[in-house]
Image (cartoon, rainbow, N blue to C red):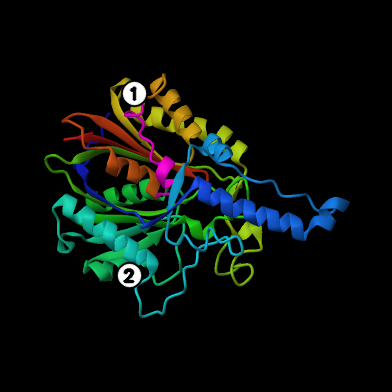
Amino acid sequence: MIDSHPPVAILGTGLYTPKESISNAELVAAFNAYVGNYNHVNQAAIDSGDLPAMAESSVEFIEKASGIKSRYVMNKSGVIDPARMCPSLPERSNDEPSIQCEMAVVASREALDNAGLQASDIGAVIVACSNLQRPYPAIAVEVQAALGIGGYAYDMNVACSSATFGIQNAVDAVRNQSANAVLMVNPEICSGHLNFRDRDSHFIFGDACTAVVIGPQCSGAFEILGTRLATLYSNNIRNNFGFLNRGDESGIGQVDKLFVQNGRKVFKEVCPMVADHIVQHLADLDIDSSSLKRLWLHQANLNMNQLVGRRVLGREPSAEESPVILDRYANTSSAGSIIAYHLYQQNFERGDIGVICSFGAGYSVGSVIVQKS
């Protein structure tokens, strides 16, 4: 049955998109230049069999493997410099706003405007993302101060599922009246932990920030009919970077301090987990999958989204039913499903139902079922 708690809704969303983007062609040119230099410098070791030669990447390989065509980034010049191959984001002084705070403020202001609310209407801020630039003070508290919000704030990390986990925390806070409304923000600088020297993953991630305002149900909003979360431990997606084990001074050089994954195992294990999760969540709310208008899925890989869509709907989903933004944004971790929701919700009419679902490392999966009021 549908949740009997006081109705809570998504009142507004916002999106920050970086100004710079990198096409597949630009990324491949930089990667292949790096590969050419690496193979040249190590030619003797390669010829003797002591080192394997690095293989070049290609636009065709990237698009076939992922469906990605370009990605927005906070810094382009460092990524496409074959001598650097990582973003150049200089550390700021403690008196300056952090990069994630700046991103979050832009997305949050749009979300508040869309919700028709002021900062004074918000009682809590949650920053939920995969990649926090520091342990403390919490980025959420910094965002809270920058926007002039009262109440409380905290950071949380459930990798790519952080947004849906954050939404459930926000729903719980509104229902138990610890906050009258909650701002949940996902500032993702995924390019900072991507190994741009690895052919199998150098194309995966982009940067972006999303924001969601959750509060009591009002006319025209998207009522949250239910939220559901699940986790299952796996080492198949991992990032060991942290303040206790940061690797060398730049973080480059020790591969396990950057994003690593066993892509084939992830695909095989996560897709059925996600599809079953959504189907069971719908069934428990007495909602038939055939009545769904839209699936706003985590934007990790086009093939994954297509498979999940087929399993949930029992047929091939249309582009309108399961919109894709990863072709131009790439994988923006926790922000991906919210970007899709933000950009593709405008044609919903009263009673239409959709599912926001994110999934990733952990393994983790979260689903939020909404209905236009």
Tell me, yes or no, whether the highlighted magenta stretch contains residue 321.
Answer: yes
Q: Mark 1 vs mark 2: which is more N-terminal?
A: 2
Q: x, y (%) of residue 59?
A: 55, 41
Residue density around tag 1, few if under 14, some if 14–19, many if 20 or more, within 10 Å: some
Answer whether labels 1 and 2 touch (C-beta < 8 Å).
no
Residue drawn where x is 17% and y is 41% of the image: 221
| Residue 332 in picture, x, y percent from top left | 43, 49
Kindly tell me whether residue 290 is visible in this rendering.
yes
| Up/down of 230 relative to 349, above or below | below
Q: Which residue is mark 1?
A: 289
The kind of residue tagged 1 is Ser
- Answer yes or no: is residue 273 visible: no
Residue denoted by label 2 = 142
Callout 2, which amino acid?
Glu
- In terms of secondary structure, where does tag 2 sit? helix
**Vertical position of residue 352 compared to residue 206: above or below:** above
Crowding near pointer 2: few (<14 within 10 Å), some, many (20+)? many
Q: Secondary structure at mark 1?
A: helix
Q: Is residue 58 above or below residue 42?
A: above
Give the number of the disc on residue 49.
none
Residue in the foreground of this view, choosing between 351 and 24: 24
Q: Residue 283 versus residue 330: which sits nearer the camera?
A: 330
Where, quadrant-wise, is the N terminus in this rendering? top left
Question: Can you tell which quarter of the image residue 292 is in?
Answer: top left
Q: Is residue 33 magenta?
A: no
Q: Which residues are magenta?
A: 318-334
Quadrant of the rendering where the C terminus is positioned: top left
Which quadrant of the view contains residue 92?
Answer: bottom left
Q: Residue 94: horizontal and vertical position, in percent?
A: 40, 79
Residue 335 located left or right of residue 370: right
